Amino acid sequence: MNIVLDPPRGITGFPTGMPAEEVKAAAAELGRVKVQDEGSAVRFRSMQVAALHPQFEIVFSLDDGKTLTSSEVWIPRPGPEEITVWFRGVDVFRTPALDLVAQLERMDLNMLHTERSSWMVPHLSLGLWRSAGHEVPLDTDGEPLYFQAALVGPTDFYDSLLNDD
């Protein structure tokens, strides 16, 4: 299975703006579905649909409770299925994190490193995190060797992080 991150348009099979019922139906094709705060548009408690596959999970956020706002893909776990997550031809979760950051910078993407384990690309709305809640291989800086999650949001998702003076 290949999942392509295509910010700000969405990810494979889940375009930004997709209606909630279609998100749930498509997520069910990937695995078990868990819906939280159905229809909610409350700030900090918006609707979420999680696709729980035996080897990975994707959390879809619907900020207005009706349409897909963002998709957060978690690193695939080992198992019988070959699962690869791509961004512009690069394997997001099998390329060491700092190497991936260097490749993205060579693509002339404006990478913001706001916290120790997170990078964002404003205007494009791609977010990458190295934080892990379990044992993973570490890089020389003590952080996970590979990114653990990637988020694709709408065009202005990370723009508030920019210091546009």
Image (tube, rainbow, N blue to C red):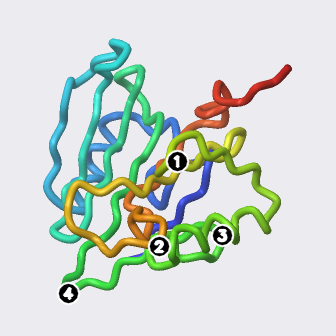
Q: Amino acid type of disc 4?
A: Pro
Classify 10 Å Cα crowding around label 1: few (below 14), some (14-19), many (20 and above): many
| Marks 3 and 4 close (CB-CB < 8 Å) | no
Provide the secondary structure element on which disc 1 rests.
Answer: strand
Classify 10 Å Cα crowding around label 4: few (below 14), some (14-19), many (20 and above): few
Provide the secondary structure element on which disc 2 rests.
Answer: loop
Q: Amino acid type of disc 3?
A: Arg
Q: Which residue is mark 3?
A: 88
Decide if residue 50 is on the left or right side of residue 103: left
Image coords of residue 153 (percent x, y) = 54, 40
Image coords of residue 49 (percent x, y) = 26, 40
Q: Which residue is mark 2?
A: 140
Q: Which residue is mark 4?
A: 80
Q: Quadrant of the C terminus?
A: top right
Q: Is residue 120 above or below residue 54?
A: above
The picture quadrant where one finds residue 79 is bottom left
Q: Which mark is residue 152?
A: 1
* Cα–Cα gap, marks 3 and 4: 25 Å
The picture quadrant where one finds residue 1 is bottom left
* Cα–Cα gap, marks 2 and 4: 30 Å
Of callouts 3 and 1, which one flags the residue occurring earlier in the amino acid sequence? 3
Of callouts 2 and 4, which one flags the residue occurring earlier in the amino acid sequence? 4
Q: Amino acid type of disc 1?
A: Val
Image coords of residue 77 (percent x, y) = 25, 73
Q: Nearer the viewer, mark 2 or mark 1?
A: 2
Classify 10 Å Cα crowding around label 2: few (below 14), some (14-19), many (20 and above): few
* Cα–Cα gap, marks 3 and 1: 13 Å
